[in-house]
Amino acid sequence: MGDWFVGCDMLGGGSIRPHYNLNAWKEAMSLVKAVHEFTETLLPSEKYGLVAQMRRAGVSIPSNIAEGAARTSAKEFAQFLSIAKGSLSELETQSLITRDLGYATAVDELLAKASKVSRLLSGLRKSISK
């Protein structure tokens, strides 16, 4: 499978959860929390608009990393990492929209976290493609 699979945590019953030890997954989980905190500051009228979209995109990132890591081939894993990267791009765009519409000005921290996750996803994809 590749080096990304070595030393993975075990969860009850011997089920291997390889994504638990992936830095990309860990940082993506941290990003989800940051997205929820950020969207709490947005206008209540955006609850079903940008807030919902940003939260869905944010949750999609670690979810796709986890699903890909559970697949049996590196090719499948790489596909799910691509999907995670697409969701990350959506989230970055939505963050910029909130800034451009004047709903929020403090998007820099969120974008910095997103950029870190993007780098980790790219590195992980290269790692499993070897």
Image (cartoon, grey):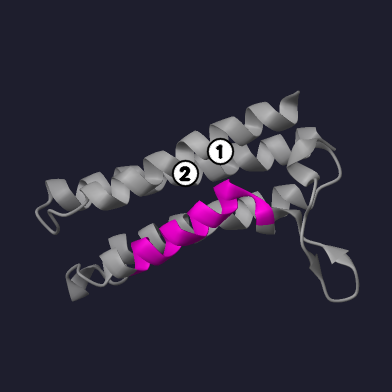
> Number of marks in the image?
2
Quadrant where the N terminus sits is top right
Residue name at image x 53 percent, y 38 percent: 120
Disc 1 residue type? Leu
* Residue 43 among those drawn in magenta: no
Which of the 4 image quadrants contains residue 51?
A: bottom left
Q: Which residues are magenta?
A: 21-36
CA separation in Å, label 1 and label 2: 6 Å
Q: Is residue 42 left or right of residue 124?
A: left
Q: Is residue 63 left or right of residue 32?
A: right
What mark, if any, has residue 121 been given in the picture? 1
Q: Is residue 122 above or below residue 39?
A: above
What mark, if any, has residue 117 been given in the picture? 2
Would residue 49 be seen by someone viewing this image from the given angle?
no
From the image, give the main secondary structure of the stretch colored magenta.
helix
Q: Which element type, helix, strand or loop, lies under badge 2?
A: helix
Q: Is residue 33 above or below residue 117?
A: below
Q: Residue furthest top?
A: 130
Residue 119 in percent (x, y) is at 48, 34
Would residue 121 be seen by someone viewing this image from the given angle?
yes
Q: Which element type, helix, strand or loop, lies under badge 1?
A: helix
Q: Is residue 109 left or right of residue 11?
A: left
Which of the 4 image quadrants contains residue 2?
A: top right
Q: Do the residues under discs 1 and 2 have CB atoms within 8 angstroms?
A: yes
Residue name at image x 73 percent, y 32 percent: 128
Disc 2 residue type? Val
Quadrant where the C terminus sits is top right
Q: Residue furthest right?
A: 13
Residue 6 in percent (x, y) is at 80, 46
